Image (cartoon, grey):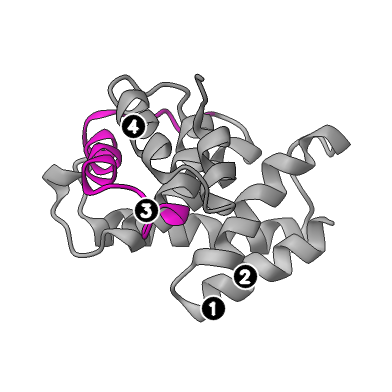
């Protein structure tokens, strides 16, 4: 009866138990933790739940992105997860001022920073290679954020970037 963000995302993807998902999201958003490992499943829940979660659950997610300061991490896969999540969440909540984000930056400033990093990372990866150990059990940490971009980026060029990097990684 206790599920995390992954279980919520699975139920939302299957369009099951929206009431349970909403209640569980509200509970989980009270004390978020996990830095970028919180960000990308939370982003997935926010996107999958746009038309399923209650208004209160969506507000709890938004509040968590204002009050919880996730650390970016210090490795290439951490940054891919962090900046993809930031890009998508600021796209979901555009035109909001800095005081509504944990970073103190506006939606536009956060989205621009995230997009600049992602474009830089793609160029570096496809011209010089990945900087981090190219280990097969890390493939999810790269494919998940790229799949998220390919699926939900509102900008066609960013969506295509996600698609191309997903193909490149695989």
Alpha carbons under labels 1 and 3: distance apart? 17 Å
Determine whether 155 is above or below 130 in the image.
below
- Answer whether labels 1 and 2 touch (C-beta < 8 Å): yes
In which image quadrant can residue 32 be found?
A: top left
Q: Which residue is mark 1?
A: 157
Q: Is residue 46 magenta?
A: no
Query: Of callouts 1 and 3, which one flags the residue occurring earlier in the amino acid sequence?
Result: 3
Q: Is residue 121 visible?
A: no
| Residue 52 horizontal side relative to residue 146, left or right | left
User: Mark number for residue 23?
Assistant: 4
Residue extent of the magenta highlight = 47-73
In which image quadrant can residue 6 be found?
A: top right
- Nearer to me, 62 or 122: 62
Q: Residues within 10 Å of mark 2 (few under 14, many from 20)?
A: some
Query: Of callouts 4 and 3, which one flags the residue occurring earlier in the amino acid sequence?
Result: 4
Q: Which residue is mark 3?
A: 89
Question: Whole-percent x and y of residue 99?
Answer: 12, 43
User: Mark number for residue 161?
Assistant: 2
Q: Residues within 10 Å of mark 3 (few under 14, many from 20)?
A: many
Numbered disc in front, either 2 or 3: 3
Q: Residue at x 49, y 67 (%)?
A: 153
- Answer whether labels 2 and 4 touch (C-beta < 8 Å): no
Furthest residue toward bottom = 156
| Residue 164 horizontal side relative to residue 169, left or right | left
Q: Residue at x 36, y 60 (%)?
A: 51
Query: Of callouts 1 and 4, which one flags the residue occurring earlier in the amino acid sequence?
Result: 4
Q: Residues within 10 Å of mark 1 (few under 14, many from 20)?
A: few
Alpha carbons under labels 4 and 3: distance apart? 21 Å
- Nearer to me, 63 or 19: 19
Quadrant location of the C terminus in the rendered image? bottom right
Numbered disc in front, either 4 or 3: 4
Alpha carbons under labels 2 and 3: distance apart? 17 Å
């Amino acid at each position: 009866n206790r599920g995390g963000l992954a279980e919520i995302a699975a139920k939302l993807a299957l369009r099951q138990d929206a009431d349970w998902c909403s209640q569980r999201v509200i509970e989980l958003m009270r004390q978020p933790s996990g830095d970028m490992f919180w960000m990308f499943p939370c982003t997935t829940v926010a996107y999958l739940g746009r038309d399923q979660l209650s208004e209160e659950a969506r507000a709890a997610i938004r509040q968590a992105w204002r009050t919880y300061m996730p650390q970016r991490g210090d490795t290439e896969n951490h940054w891919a997860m962090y900046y993809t999540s930031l890009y998508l969440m600021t796209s979901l909540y555009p035109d909001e001022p800095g005081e509504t984000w944990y970073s103190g930056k506006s939606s536009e400033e956060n989205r621009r920073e995230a997009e600049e990093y992602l474009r830089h990372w793609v160029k570096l990866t496809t011209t010089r290679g990945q900087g981090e150990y190219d280990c097969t059990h890390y493939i999810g940490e790269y494919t998940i954020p790229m799949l998220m971009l390919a699926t939900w980026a509102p900008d066609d060029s960013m969506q295509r970037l996600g698609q191309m990097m997903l193909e490149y990684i695989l």
